[in-house]
Image (tube, rainbow, N blue to C red):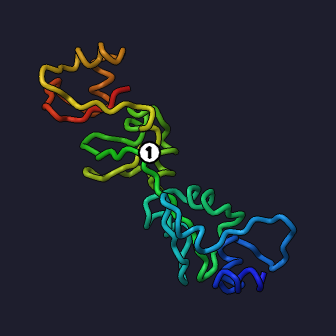
Amino acid sequence: MYKIALENNLTVQELMNLNNLTSTSLSIGQKLKLKNEIASSDDSNIYTVVKGDTLYAIANKYNISIQDIIDANNLTSTSLSVGQKLIIPTNQNNTMYTVVSGDTLYKIATQFNTTVNEIKTLNNLTNNTLSIGQMLKIPSANNYLTYTVKSGDNLYKIAQTYNTTVSAIQDLNNLSTSNLSIGQKLLIP
């Protein structure tokens, strides 16, 4: 462990933290993450744990789930060490939804064909209270197409084209009227 750390300009503790190891024992063929491998990752950020950090606080800071951090770092426990480096995954497959008057988690989950628990987990919510204007990540949004309204479009025509219904498009996009604007983006079920 000391030799590997020295060759890669790391301390033994940094190497242990990067790989979530609890001892310096290594086995032949074991793969280790090195600082430069992680830093070059295009789809992740690196976070260094500071005193008082928890997975919950870090997940909130980056607006991702605790499970995302656990999975990205192959963590076997929720314990963190000061100086430990964590990969913070970025998730660009989620669509953002803005809460409007009358919304409930159940209504939003039904609208996007997901569950209340999935929305709560993804957004690190501890209760069902929502605020108007609150932004929520929607986990199943990648099951939908995004359509940009063009001149001459109407909801009926779009629904026919994508083999869905006008009401399904209205519900999914929280539309109270059938009026559309050129350039408007619609989720299509």
Q: Residue at x 51, y 51 (%)?
A: 121
Residue that extends furthest to the front in the rendered view of this protein: 7
Q: Is residue 18 above or below residue 140?
A: below
Q: Residue at x 42, y 49 (%)?
A: 92
x and y, in percent, of residue 30 in the image: 80, 65
Q: Nearer the viewer, residue 187 or 16?
A: 16
Q: Is residue 180 above or below residue 141?
A: above
- SS class, disc 1: loop
Q: Is residue 12 above or below residue 61?
A: below
x and y, in percent, of residue 22 in the image: 77, 76
Q: Residue at x 12, y 24 (%)?
A: 151
Is 126 displayed left or right of 3 in the figure? Answer: left
The quadrant in which the N terminus is found is: bottom right
Report the amino acid beneath label 1. Answer: Asn
x and y, in percent, of residue 189 in the image: 38, 26
Location of residue 78 by image quarter: bottom right
Q: Nearer the viewer, residue 84 or 133?
A: 84
Is 156 displayed left or right of 86 in the figure? Answer: left
Location of residue 12 by image quarter: bottom right
Q: Is residue 58 above or below residue 83?
A: above
State the count of labels. Answer: 1
Residue under circle 1? 93
Location of residue 35 by image quarter: bottom right
Dot 1 crowding, Cα within 10 Å, few <14, some 14–19, many 20+:
few
Q: Residue at x 32, y 52 (%)?
A: 135
Q: Nearer the viewer, residue 146 or 82?
A: 146
x and y, in percent, of residue 38 in the image: 57, 68
Q: Nearer the viewer, residue 65 or 23?
A: 23
